[in-house]
Image: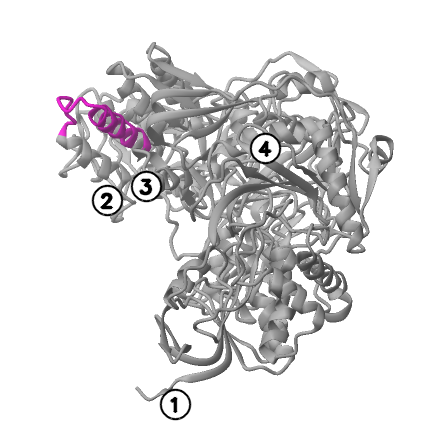
């Protein structure tokens, strides 16, 4: 049986987990203990999980985050979100085709009173912001309940295999996200005053200042906090294009969850939409997982993410199409190809510029929105509330960590400890960490004259400084007021000892070391490399690339080694002519033929553009209502059902507003729809004090 | 300002909800120049969209029975007549009896309901379980079953009335709040909003939960006091339940509750708090779901697995006796009241709308007089609705 499990990963250890057998449409399949049904299905190469009740179109994984309900399957007779439900020995899973039937189960189990628990502080979300806040509260002995809907703490940190940017002093810069998660979790767990509930989803903030929580996925409890901290992170924006409902069109978070958390490959060939950090990093993660990255489109003339992230992808041989957009994802039951086109100044595709690429997955990374509805409800109901991390303002995880620290101390002060001081420079650091990428300088390559020196291919102002702390001789400096400046090597040809720590430690993989001591005409260039060692084994030459992805030719491979104390980044040494040695920024991974467009047009499969994924409402239906004069989204919702589905307009809300803008309607004429609880769907029995876990066992 | 500068309408309706919108439709159908003013951005945005969608004629008095029967006629034939799918489903209503007390109340009512010719009958336990197989059989005595009652989508229905009212010439002004009336010679002479001033021959108060405030603008002290009820909707599942189930047993915190499966598969449910929660607050509370879920699962254990999707809270504009108020005020005498629907505005709306049109046209029928007498604004409010 073909397996889509990632056997070899340069950063993540191979998973050797006990296995179990479950059934998909009565066929026995092998799964890993502790993984979700969705990951188990994808590992077994099953991508279509059901068909939509409205139009019978195929459905597959989309958010992998428990939000969207696209991945619904019927497990032992009950509809479940396969991305949240763990696979169990012997369960029978069927596709969710059409409406599910309510299990015929007439037993009346005991019903308990719903408990109300009091806590000084409730934190919703155990990601970088929530954990960092909890640590500050824990240090001051404040009792905290921290709830998170996932199986482990860390939020999206657990998906981040790359080294973090930011400030080494303030926030673990240079450490990989997965390891930051572990460190934060260990620290949080060291405080006796912090209670942690995993698999526990906050459902609603009620008017009586109680927060409804589904504890451990089966027990409904109410929590009445003195202070609420909302650290729920962000949700991904969705995009309207033809075929966007096809299985294989997935969010960046879903992709990273499958690849980096569960070590399963949802696809073999990936196309990325969106050149922000999320899309750029996801592309890099795909390559590390052994997935081919066919290309990336970005609507703006420049990628919005850090240039070093973009440069990494370009060096690996991933073409980046700026001022381009996705026209359609094409395929019958799942994505088979993608069509892109150049866009004009109004962001409209220019006819005749279409290109088609073969791929089996389209990753959507077009921005994030704060998950802040609990915060807004708390404010409305006069429940003292704070908000941290992406739930407050979308930024990098390092900024979320720092924002959590600050909010943690603000809460300590709010709870009657005004003597606790927040260092004034923290606010400034917080702002710096949130700052967007700045000015790009042209590259000044150093003069090589027989010595050894690092070449720093880092041209853009970003909040990042690990390189300055890595050099044992302190020869790498940022000559500006704060860490947003561009780093410079201040030694000459004869000061650097060639330790390579800067090469292995730069989160952007933007430092090389050029050593011309032995052979001034053919120096040795050390290049950071985060792919399996095996990928270069047996090779005599490699193709080297400059910072813009230009081919500098094939040069001899001299060796591969790891630096002691360094964390999984390899150093590859090549020997290159002096003329190109300092220009070399990386080694190409993907040959150009792999990313070429198809030489024939793709037969137009009439795919519709889905706006509301839950109810399968198309852009055409919404546009028609807008053109008829409807301006109240509540009314559009009533007429089209867009926003009435399981996710509660979390996905379509933005797109509908965008359609209004595209139709030339100023948004001040538009009334947004009312948002109501619950955050996710929950069995009625849970509210009646029935342990739905017992029910599951009973039912099985 | 001379009045000739103001737009003049034969009828101005305040409130584009469950009552005002069908009223506008029937007025427009009769060629009456009508304006509907609503403070919200589109029709049905206050209590209409918070109604759960149940529609019955099986009340306990001739007024609501007649209005209900006519409303069912309009709802059930709407799609064939006008083309809009309002998700009408004739699933019937079942009032269950698990105790002798409710059996007695329901059977007494049945006599009355039969005397008005309603299609409603008593089913013993076995018969009832055939109609609703998933009812908890323990202690079940039986219940009433009225197969001609049903349900529809309040939002789609109000929108259908709105669309056709506009097609027939009625005007709707949204995002506009009525602030003042000019009263002169015992009549409302002008209606002032935050945008404009209008004149009208007749002004209809169809302001639902806010009818009392609109009444005050005309110097009236309308006995309409909203209380709030919470409701919720589940995921859709394949059909397993036909009638609306109503349980009138009181329990701590609630008097009755009811649920049904909508045409599109969702279970929609609601509970009546006891004591009432007076006021216009429509924010969600933490008490509702635990209270209602327990009662629903006791009556139908199978429901424990259905997943709740959304919850909300709406207003029941109550009157002291539990009956609506329909008819002209004494002063101002061109002020037509259609208020205090006591949570039944949606199900009675089409019948009330048609009646309002006949009142405006001076074409009331002998049957209407019976209704208008019971629902008269000038009544003493001494009785009590038995199934409010």
Q: How many marks?
A: 4
Label 2 belongs to which residue?
Answer: A444
How far is the residue under mark 4 from the one under mark 2?
71 Å
Verify CB contact (< 8 Å) between mark 1 and mark 4.
no
Dot 3, how many residues are within 10 Å of its Cα: few (below 14), some (14-19), or many (20+)? few
Q: Check contact, mark 2 vs mark 3: CB within 8 A.
A: no
Chain letter of the residue beneath label 1 in the structure image? B
Give the Cα distance between marks 2 and 1.
79 Å
Task: Give the mark nearer the N terminus: 2 vs 3.
Answer: 2
Asked if both marks, 2 and 1, belong to the same chain, the answer given is no
Image position of B182 (left or right of B380): left
Question: Do the residues at pointers 4 and 2 share their chain?
Answer: no
Kindly indicate the quadrant of the structure image that contains residue A449: top left
The dot on residue A137 is: none
Q: Are marks 2 and 1 in contact (CB under 8 Å)?
A: no
Look at the image and tell me in which quarter the C terminus of chain A lies: top right
* Disc 1 to disc 4, C-alpha distance: 55 Å
Judge depth for marks 4 and 2 and give the one in front: 4
The residue tagged 4 is B292
Please give the residue where the numbered disc 3 appears in the rendered image.
A579
Q: Which element is circle 2 on? A: loop
Observer-nearest of A366 and A582: A366
Taking the magenta stretch, the answer to whether it contains residue A184 is no
Residue pictured at 61% horizontal, 37% vertical = B256
């Amino acid at each position: 049986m073909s397996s889509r499990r990632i056997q070899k990963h340069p950063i993540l250890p191979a998973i050797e987990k006990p296995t179990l057998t479950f059934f998909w449409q009565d066929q026995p399949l092998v799964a890993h203990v502790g993984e979700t049904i969705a990951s188990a299905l994808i590992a077994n190469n099953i991508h279509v999980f059901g068909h939509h009740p409205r139009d019978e179109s195929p459905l597959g994984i989309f958010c992998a985050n428990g939000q969207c309900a696209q991945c619904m399957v019927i497990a032992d007779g009950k509809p479940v979100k396969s991305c949240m439900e763990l696979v169990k020995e012997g369960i029978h899973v069927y596709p969710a085709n059409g409406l599910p039937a309510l299990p015929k189960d007439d037993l009346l189990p005991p019903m308990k009173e719903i408990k109300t628990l009091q806590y000084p502080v409730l934190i919703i979300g155990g990601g970088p912001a929530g954990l960092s806040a909890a640590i500050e509260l824990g240090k001051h002995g404040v009792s905290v309940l921290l709830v998170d809907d996932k199986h482990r703490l860390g939020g999206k940190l657990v998906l981040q295999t790359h080294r973090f940017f930011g400030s080494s002093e303030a926030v673990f810069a240079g450490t990989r996200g997965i390891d930051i998660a572990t460190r934060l979790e260990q620290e949080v767990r060291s405080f006796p005053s912090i209670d942690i509930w995993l698999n526990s989803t906050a459902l609603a903030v009620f008017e009586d200042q109680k927060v409804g929580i589904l504890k451990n996925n089966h027990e409904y409890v109410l929590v009445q906090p003195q202070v609420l901290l909302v650290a729920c992170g962000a949700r991904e924006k969705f995009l309207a294009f033809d075929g966007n409902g096809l299985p294989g069109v997935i969010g960046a978070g879903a992709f990273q969850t499958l690849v980096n958390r569960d070590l399963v490959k949802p696809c073999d060939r990936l196309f990325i939409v969106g050149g922000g950090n999320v899309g750029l990093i996801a592309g890099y993660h795909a390559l590390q997982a052994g997935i081919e990255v066919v290309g990336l489109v970005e609507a703006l003339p420049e990628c919005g993410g850090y240039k070093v992230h973009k440069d990494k992808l370009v060096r690996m041989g991933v073409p980046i199409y700026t001022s381009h957009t996705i026209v359609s994802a094409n395929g019958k039951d799942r994505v088979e190809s993608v069509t892109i086109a150049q866009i004009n100044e109004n962001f409209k595709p220019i006819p005749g510029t279409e290109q088609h690429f073969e791929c089996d997955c389209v990753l959507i990374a077009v921005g994030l929105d704060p998950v802040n509805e609990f915060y807004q409800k708390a404010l409305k109901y006069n429940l003292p509330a704070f908000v941290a991390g992406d739930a407050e303002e979308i930024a990098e995880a390092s900024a979320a960590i720092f924002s959590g620290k600050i909010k943690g101390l603000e809460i300590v002060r709010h709870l009657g400890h005004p003597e606790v001081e927040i260092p004034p420079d923290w606010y400034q650091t917080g702002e710096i960490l949130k700052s967007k990428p700045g000015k790009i300088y042209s590259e000044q390559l150093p003069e090589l004259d027989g010595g050894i020196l690092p070449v720093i291919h880092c041209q853009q102002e970003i909040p990042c400084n690990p390189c300055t702390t890595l050099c044992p001789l302190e020869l790498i400096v940022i000559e500006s007021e704060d860490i947003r400046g561009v780093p410079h090597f201040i030694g000459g040809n004869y000061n650097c000892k060639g330790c390579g720590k800067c090469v292995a430690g730069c989160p952007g993989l933007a430092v090389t070391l050029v050593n011309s001591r032995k052979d001034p005409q053919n120096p040795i260039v050390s290049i950071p490399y985060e792919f399996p060692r095996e990928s270069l084994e047996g090779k005599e030459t490699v193709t080297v690339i400059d910072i813009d992805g230009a081919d500098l030719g094939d040069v001899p491979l001299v060796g591969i080694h790891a630096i002691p104390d360094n964390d999984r980044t390899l150093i590859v040494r090549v020997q290159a002519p002096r003329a190109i040695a300092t220009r070399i920024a990386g080694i190409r991974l993907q040959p150009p033929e792999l990313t070429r467009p198809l030489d024939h047009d793709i037969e137009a499969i009439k795919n519709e553009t889905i706006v509301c994924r839950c109810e399968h409402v198309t852009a055409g239906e919404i546009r028609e209502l807008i053109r008829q004069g409807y301006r109240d989204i509540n009314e559009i919702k009533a007429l089209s059902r867009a926003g009435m589905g399981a996710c509660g307009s979390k996905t379509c809300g933005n797109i509908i507003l965008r359609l209004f803008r595209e139709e030339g309607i100023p948004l001040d004429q538009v009334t947004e729809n009312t948002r109501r609880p619950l955050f996710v769907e929950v069995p009625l029995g849970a509210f009646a004090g029935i342990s739905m876990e017992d029910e599951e066992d009973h039912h099985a | 300002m001379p009045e000739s500068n103001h737009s003049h309408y034969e009828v101005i309706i305040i409130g584009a909800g469950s009552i005002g919108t069908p009223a506008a439709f029937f007025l427009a159908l009769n060629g009456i120049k009508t304006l509907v003013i609503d403070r919200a951005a589109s029709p049905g945005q206050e209590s209409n969209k918070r109604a759960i969608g149940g529609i019955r004629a099986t009340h306990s008095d001739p007024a609501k029975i007649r209005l209900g029967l006519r409303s069912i006629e309009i709802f059930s034939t709407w799609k064939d007549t006008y083309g809009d799918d309002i998700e009408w489903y004739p699933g019937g209503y079942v009032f269950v009896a698990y105790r002798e007390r409710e059996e007695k109340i329901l059977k007494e009512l049945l006599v009355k309901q039969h005397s008005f010719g309603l299609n409603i009958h008593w089913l013993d336990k076995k018969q009832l379980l055939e109609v609703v197989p998933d009812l908890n059989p323990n202690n079940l005595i039986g219940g009433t079953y009225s197969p001609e009652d049903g349900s529809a989508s309040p939002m789609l229905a109000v929108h259908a009335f709105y669309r056709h009212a506009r097609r027939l010439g009625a005007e709707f002004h949204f995002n506009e709040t009525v602030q003042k009336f000019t009263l002169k010679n015992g009549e409302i002479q002008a209606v002032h909003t935050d945008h404009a001033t209008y004149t009208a021959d007749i002004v209809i108060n169809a302001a639902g939960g806010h009818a009392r405030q609109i009444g005050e603008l005309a110097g009236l002290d309308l006995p309409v006091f909203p209380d709030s009820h919470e409701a919720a909707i589940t995921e859709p599942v394949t059909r397993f339940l036909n009638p609306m189930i109503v349980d009138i047993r009181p329990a701590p915190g609630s008097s009755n509750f009811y649920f049904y499966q909508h045409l599109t598969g969702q279970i929609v449910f609601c509970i009546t708090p006891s004591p009432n929660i007076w006021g216009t607050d429509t924010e969600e509370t933490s008490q509702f779901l635990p209270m209602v879920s327990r009662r629903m699962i006791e009556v139908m254990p199978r429901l424990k697995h259905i997943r709740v999707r959304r919850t909300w809270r709406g207003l029941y504009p109550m009157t002291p006796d539990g009956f609506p108020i329909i008819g002209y005020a004494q002063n101002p005498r061109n002020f037509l009241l259609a208020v205090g629907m006591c949570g039944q505005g949606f199900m009675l709306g089409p019948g009330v709308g048609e009646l309002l049109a006949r009142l405006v046209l001076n074409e009331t029928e002998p049957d209407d007089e019976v209704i208008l007498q019971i629902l008269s604004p000038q009544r003493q409010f001494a009785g009590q609705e038995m199934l409010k």
